[in-house]
Structures are given as C-alpha cells and as structure tokens.
Amino acid sequence: MELQIYGRNLEINDQIREHVETKLGQIDRHLPGISTATVELALEPTRSSNDRVVAQVSLHVGGTLLRAQQRAANTKAAINSVAKALDQQINRYKSHAYRSERNRRHSRGADERLEDSYIPGGVAEDGAIAGTALADAKSIDGEIVRVKEFVMDPTSVEEAAVQMQFLGHSFYMFLDSESNKHCVLYLRGDGNYGLIQPKS
C-alpha cells in the first residue's frame, strides 16, 4: 500500500506519521488490496476548538474509492475518528462485494452463456466537480477555493449509485460505460436518484 500524507496549516512530524501508519496498517490487514492511501490533515480556524483538526483519508481499492472525513480537537483524535469511520465503510464495501460475487456466481450457474458484466465503479473526488465550466465566475457568491482532478473509469449507473453511497455524497460524476457520456447522478429529496446527462 502506497501511503501519502499531506498537511495543511500543520506540520506532519514523525509522531503523527507513525500514528497514521499504525492506524492504516490495521485497515490494510482488514482490507487487502488497497493500492493507495491518501491522508490529508488540516488545521482550520473554527469557533469550537473541538473540531479544528480535519482528517480525511481516501483509499483506492481496485476501481473503487473509499473516503472518510472527521473532525476533532487534536490530530491524534481526528486520525482515530476517521479510521473508525473507514472501518464502517469497509464493512459496507465488503458486504456489497460479497453480494455482487454471489449474484454473479448464481447467474453463471443458471445460464453459463451469460457474461460477467460487473465493472467496478469509477473514481471520484469530493468538493467541486472537476472540469465544470463557470459561465461567469464574477457573478457567483464566494470563491473557488479547491479544485480536484480525477481519473474517470467507465462505470454503469448502478455501480455509480453504489460508489456514491460508499462516499456518502449526494451527487456523483462518472463516465457512463453504456453511453460513453459524462453524467451526474444525484440523490433526490424523495430518496430516489436523478441522472443528468448531455443531450445527444
């Protein structure tokens, strides 16, 4: 597992690095197959001192991205909290992977001519949608303070919905494997999903 640790407004010393490596080492044993783990630690000015340290961890597992973010009063507590949140995501991920594999085996047993069409979900990042064009940046309130770029692997709408649930987001941008179009899946107020796609 390749580990990348970044700090914003705080120094990543040996003690912090060692604590991160210990926590992620436990996760790596719980979920083999993690290719890259990215840890971002930030010190942010807040009214409450109990949530001034933000810890965000992103795990790349095959074509799937698992991410958790937590706040705490200090770096160690934030790391502990985000590791606990990741454990919950990993349990959901492993449960989904088990059900998907069981369904694929059942389908092959029922009809050997069916092909295994499972495609892992694409990788997405949080924050602003990369590549979004703003018609007039001067007319918006606030500023763009963070831009994320990411690789989009083709994925189905169903797997995009699963990936969005793993990330805990209300929207998910992906490359549709069927239409080869960039689409946005979003969670509606009624609990169902909406899909935004370019018109042909």
Image (cartoon, grey):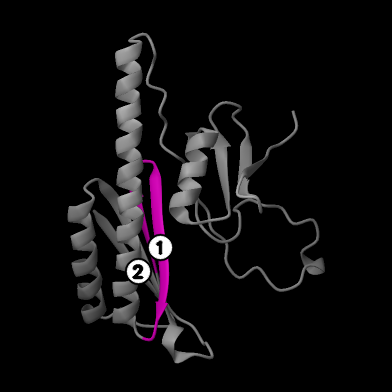
Q: Is residue 60 magenta?
A: yes
Q: Which residues are magenta?
A: 56-73
Work out whether residue 187 can be spotted: yes
Identify which residue, 107 or 50, lies in the foreground.
107
Tell me the CA gap for discs 1 and 2.
Answer: 6 Å
Q: Quadrant of residue 98?
A: top left
Q: What residue does disc 2 label?
A: 82
In-image side of 183 versus 100 (left or right): right
Q: Tag 2: residue type?
A: Val
Q: Quadrant of residue 142?
A: bottom right
Work out whether residue 152 can be spotted: no
Say which label, 1 or 2, has the lower sequence index. 1
Looking at the rendered image, the quarter that the C terminus falls into is: top right
Residue 182 picture location, percent across and down: 62, 38
Residue 69 picture location, percent across and down: 42, 67
Mark 2 crowdedness (10 Å alpha carbons): few <14, some 14-19, many ≥20: many
Element type where label 1 sits in the image: strand
Main SS of the magenta part reads: strand
Q: Tell me whether circle 1 and circle 2 mark residues in contact (CB < 8 Å).
A: yes
Q: Is residue 119 magenta?
A: no
In-image side of 166 versus 170 (left or right): left
Q: Tag 1: residue type?
A: Ala
Marking on residue 68: 1
Residue 86 picture location, percent across and down: 33, 60
Residue 184 picture location, percent across and down: 62, 44
Element type where label 2 sits in the image: helix
Q: Which residue does the image show at 28% across and 60% down from the upper left? A: 3
Q: Quadrant of residue 139?
A: bottom right
Q: Is residue 11 above or below residue 190?
A: below
In-image side of 63 versus 184 (left or right): left
